[in-house]
Image (spheres, helix red, strand yellow):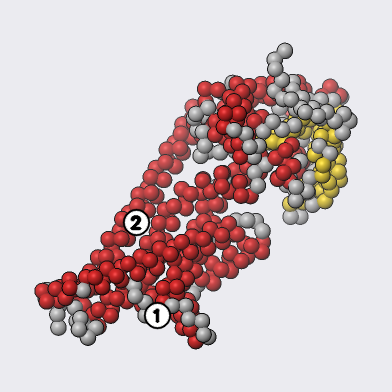
């Protein structure tokens, strides 16, 4: 059939470009809402984990371990098929958003936890000693300092959630990967494997590459800033000595 | 006379500003405070000294519930401090100066000073900034209002931290080893600010190793070891005529003439 250099195959992909773009749109929607959900879950569980209250920390730990140590595919199948058979069909988009949100929520929770734990204990104490309650401490003092630790790995999570929409294929989603697969196996469109997958991959790359570059740039500038303030501290102590 | 730093609105003659009653504190198996009883009167300057691990820091940290005692009672300005009311009561009555300054590094000096007055005491920005500049003048660092704390020397950071505590306009300021993390040549500038404060009607509790400071400003000095108060008295009694053997050894080690 049509190979990489077949103009006919490329032409077919071009004709069906709208289908690919629709797949991309579905992927963006699932990833976008999934991301929002994962941020909510991750924020709450991250705060639970650092609350110093044992039951809350245990809930956060259990969730993170359970979700991180089972495959996303299984979680999707469970949500879609298991619930469908018990009479609560969720629909493909809701399944996608829920499963991606739940899965990445566990990772976001760990990122948030690490970010909060990176703030020195003295900051919590200073805020408490001024009379800030939990919310005030977090809003004005702790989270603004955590955010620079949280952001770079968070952007990586965005990239991952975007790529993980491909798992929706297992429940027959309409995301970019599923659409590509239907395209290359379709009765009228079948066979244009190489062009179809190249185009699909290119679409993923166009979205993900700027994001992950942003993340690594952020990390580098963060390190530079730390080095600079570290140097300043050293200079000061040298001056003193 | 200069204008007073503080206007204490109501006088409560005779009542203790801070009262610890049979306070016990454990860290795991370690019994760090053993039945501590202590009263600090309004406007009193109390200095706590003692070897490291004696429980003196824990004692002041119990006064604003940074450490909650395992048993016993803490009263601040006549009201019992509990797990439930700690945020409110601490906000109203006490502020603290730490060994490590603990300024907020993501904010300028001015922002450090106005944050709590604006967010907790609901002052307008103008009021809060006026207050902030007033106390920056008190600590002699008005020109540093717009820099970030990490660009300052330790002594300057601690003076800013004292200004931040003053901006709370609380009746009590707790000092937890305020000069222990400082380079020797910056200690005096911080002590000078504290000596200035000691002339006001603020209740001050100071954990310190600075014996000169203790002699100069304390109304009363307490010696702690092994989680107990072993001796207390006026600075004169305390330094000229110590009774307790451990205090004698401690003073002998710390004051080298």
Which of labels 2 and 1 is toward the front?
A: 1
Q: Say what secondary structure mark 2 lies in.
A: helix
Question: In this rendering, does residue B254 appear at all?
Answer: yes
Relative height, residue A15 to residue A234 (above, below): below
Tag of residue B151: none
**B152 left or right of B27?**
left
Q: Nearer the viewer, residue B139 or B47?
A: B139
Q: Where does label 1 land, which residue?
A: A171
Q: How crowded is mark 2: few (under 14 residues within 10 Å), some or many (20 or more)?
A: some
Residue at image point 67% right, 33% down? B168
Residues marked 2 and 1, same chain? yes
Q: Nearer the viewer, residue B139 or B230?
A: B139
Q: In which quarter of the image is residue B135?
A: top right
Q: Which percent across, then down, holds residue A149?
A: 47, 50
Q: Which percent across, then down, holds residue B189?
A: 62, 22
Tag of residue A211: 2
Residue at image point 71% right, 27% down? B210
Q: Quadrant of residue A140?
A: top right
Upstream in sequence: badge 2 or badge 1 = 1
Quadrant containing the N terminus of chain B in the rendered view: top right
Residue at image point 20% right, 81% down? A189
Q: How far apart are marks 2 and 1 (CA)?
A: 27 Å
Q: Nearer the viewer, residue B235 or A146?
A: A146
Residue at image point 74% right, 55% down? B28
Q: Which percent across, then down, holds residue A237?
A: 51, 31
Chain letter of disc 1 in the image: A
**B177 left or right of A74?**
right
Q: Nearer the viewer, residue A241 or B101?
A: B101
């Amino acid at each position: 059939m049509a190979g990489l250099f077949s103009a006919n195959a490329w032409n077919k992909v071009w004709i069906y470009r709208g289908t690919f773009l629709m797949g991309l749109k579905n992927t963006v929607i699932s990833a976008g809402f999934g991301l929002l959900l994962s941020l909510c879950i991750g924020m709450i569980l991250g705060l639970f984990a650092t609350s110093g209250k044992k039951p809350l920390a245990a809930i956060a730990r259990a969730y993170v371990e359970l979700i991180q140590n089972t495959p996303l595919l299984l979680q999707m199948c469970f949500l879609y098929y298991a619930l469908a058979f018990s009479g609560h069909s969720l629909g493909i988009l809701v399944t996608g958003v829920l499963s991606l949100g739940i899965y990445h929520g566990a990772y976001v929770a760990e990122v948030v936890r690490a970010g909060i734990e990176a703030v020195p204990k003295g900051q919590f104490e200073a805020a408490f000693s001024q009379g800030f309650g939990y919310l005030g401490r977090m809003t004005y003092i702790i989270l603004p300092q955590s955010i620079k630790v949280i952001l770079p790995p968070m952007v990586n999570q965005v990239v991952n959630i975007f790529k993980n929409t491909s798992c929706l294929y297992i429940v027959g989603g309409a995301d970019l990967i599923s659409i590509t697969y239907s395209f290359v196996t379709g009765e009228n469109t079948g066979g244009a494997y190489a062009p179809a997958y190249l185009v699909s991959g290119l679409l993923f790359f166009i979205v993900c590459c700027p994001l992950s570059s942003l993340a690594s740039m952020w990390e580098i500038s963060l390190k530079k800033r730390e080095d600079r303030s570290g140097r300043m501290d050293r200079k000061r102590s040298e001056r003193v000595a | 006379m200069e204008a007073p730093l503080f206007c204490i609105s109501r006088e409560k003659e005779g009542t203790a500003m801070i009262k610890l009653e049979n306070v016990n504190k454990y860290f795991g198996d370690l019994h760090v405070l053993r039945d501590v009883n202590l009263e600090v009167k309004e406007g009193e300057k109390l200095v706590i000294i003692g070897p490291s691990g004696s429980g003196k820091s824990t004692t002041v940290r119990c006064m604003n519930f940074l450490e909650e005692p395992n048993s016993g009672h803490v009263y601040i300005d006549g009201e019992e401090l509990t797990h439930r009311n700690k945020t409110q009561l601490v906000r109203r009555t006490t502020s603290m100066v730490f060994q490590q300054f603990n300024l907020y590094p993501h904010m300028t000096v001015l922002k450090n000073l106005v944050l709590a007055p604006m967010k907790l005491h609901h002052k307008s920005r103008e009021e809060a900034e006026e207050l902030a500049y007033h106390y920056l003048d008190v600590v002699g660092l008005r020109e540093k209002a717009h820099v970030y704390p990490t660009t300052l020397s330790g002594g300057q950071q601690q003076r800013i931290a004292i200004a931040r505590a003053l901006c709370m306009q609380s009746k009590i300021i707790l000092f937890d080893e305020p000069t222990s993390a400082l380079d020797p040549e910056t200690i005096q500038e911080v002590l000078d600010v504290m000596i200035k404060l000691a002339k006001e009607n603020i209740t001050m509790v100071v954990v310190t190793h600075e014996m000169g400071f203790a002699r100069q400003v304390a109304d009363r000095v307490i010696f702690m070891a092994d989680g107990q108060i072993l001796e207390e008295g006026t600075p004169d009694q305390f330094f000229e005529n110590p009774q307790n053997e451990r205090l004698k050894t401690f003073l002998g080690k710390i004051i080298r003439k």
